[in-house]
């Protein structure tokens, strides 16, 4: 019996190729947009988690700092329990690192008169699990030392990124809901057209005693197939876009530290299953209205 249902569903898909293609493409685009937001959140979340595991604080020293003062200051830093690692970076080493990072823009550094960079300490703070108040207190404590000219850490820009992520998250929920609803109605209209094209056949089947389950089963299978194909198509498009962007980022010096990763297999399976559910629900709406009439 299942083979008969599958055969009828495939025949309907073949007989309505154009509208079937439009339905699959619509679902694929819906899945692509929703999955793109999910991929963005996953990668941004990993980046933020990595940053929080070892928060860096840069303490820039005054230009007149002596070696004895620097050694004494390092000893004081080592006594602060919230600091995990201390690395002294002389200004000559800092300039060499800057030239290495900007080797493709060497012309910007060719006319420097002397070394404008100060000596500094790079401090790795222990993970505070998003407790920015403690991080800010630590930075303020370090800045209070007379030898420190300025302190730099990533709290301000990270808070801005988190706010932007929240906006993207809300936008993603809104767009995802709109496109999923659009997918449901597209599938519903597709199944409705197939139902009307087979209206006489369905009426004959009902006259000879066919049950509603026998009539509905192939259409439900058709909805599941359309949803599944659309979900797989959307993920394939997303993977192609992800690989293209990843290749471009690896060639760019500024974004070379970003490592994009695709959605995990369980998430991909979940997306396809939701897509199939969208197809099934669209079919359910059409059958409910059609059989009622």
Image: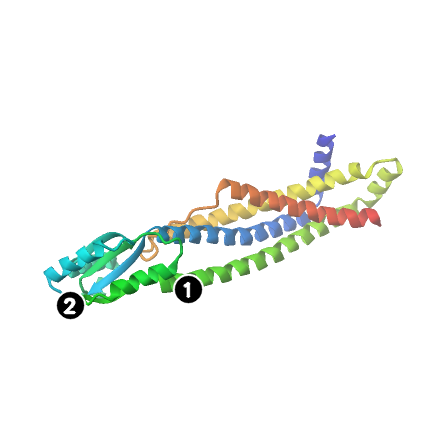
Looking at the figure, which quarter contains the N terminus? top right
Q: CA distance from mark 2 to mark 1?
A: 32 Å
Judge the density around disc 2: few (<14), some (14-19), many (≥20) Cα neighbours within 10 Å.
some
Q: On the picture, is 98 further left or further right than 127?
A: left
Q: On the picture, is 31 further left or further right than 204?
A: left
From where the camera sits, is residue 266 visible? yes
Q: Element type at marker 2? A: loop
Snapshot quadrant of residue 95 = bottom left
Q: On the picture, is 256 further left or further right than 269?
A: left
Residue occupied by mark 2: 63
Q: Position of residue 206 (x, y in %)?
A: 86, 39
Q: Residue at x 28, y 59 (%)?
A: 57
| Of residues 140 and 202, the one drawn nearer to the viewer in this rendering | 140
Residue 240 to residue 210: above or below: below
Residue occupied by mark 1: 160
Q: Residue at x 71, y 50 (%)?
A: 188
Contact flag, marks 2 and 1 (Cβ < 8 Å):
no
Q: Residue at x 62, y 48 (%)?
A: 24
| Of residues 123 and 100, the one drawn nearer to the viewer in this rendering | 123
Mark closer to the chain start, 2 or 1: 2
Snapshot quadrant of residue 253 = bottom left
Q: Which residue, as the protein is rendered here, is positioned at the far right?
A: 207
Q: Residue at x 69, y 39 (%)?
A: 221
């Amino acid at each position: 019996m299942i083979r008969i249902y599958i055969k009828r569903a495939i025949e309907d898909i073949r007989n309505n190729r154009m509208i079937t293609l439009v339905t699959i493409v619509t679902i694929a685009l819906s899945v692509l947009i929703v999955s793109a937001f999910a991929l963005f959140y996953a990668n941004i979340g990993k980046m933020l988690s990595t940053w929080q595991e070892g928060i860096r604080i840069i303490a820039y020293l005054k230009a007149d700092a002596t070696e004895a003062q620097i050694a004494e200051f390092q000893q004081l830093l080592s006594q602060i329990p919230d600091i995990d690692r201390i690395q002294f970076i002389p200004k000559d080493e800092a300039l060499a690192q800057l030239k290495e990072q900007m080797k493709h823009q060497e012309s910007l550094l060719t006319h420097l008169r002397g070394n404008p960079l100060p000596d500094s300490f790079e401090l790795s703070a222990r993970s505070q699990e998003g407790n920015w108040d403690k991080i800010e207190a630590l930075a303020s404590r370090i800045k209070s030392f007379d030898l420190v000219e300025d302190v730099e850490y990533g709290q301000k820009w990270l808070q801005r990124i988190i706010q932007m992520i929240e906006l993207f998250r809300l936008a993603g929920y809104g767009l995802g809901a709109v496109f999923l609803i659009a997918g449901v109605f597209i599938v519903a209209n597709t199944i409705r057209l197939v139902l009307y094209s087979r209206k006489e056949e369905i009426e004959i089947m009902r006259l000879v005693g066919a049950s509603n389950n026998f009539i509905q089963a192939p259409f439900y299978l058709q909805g599941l197939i359309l949803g599944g194909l659309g979900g797989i198509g959307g993920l394939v498009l997303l993977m192609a876009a992800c690989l293209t962007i990843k290749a471009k980022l690896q060639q760019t010096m500024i974004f070379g530290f970003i490592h994009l990763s695709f959605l995990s297999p369980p998430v991909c399976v979940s997306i396809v299953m939701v897509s199939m559910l969208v197809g099934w629900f669209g079919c359910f709406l059409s059958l409910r209205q059609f059989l009622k009439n």
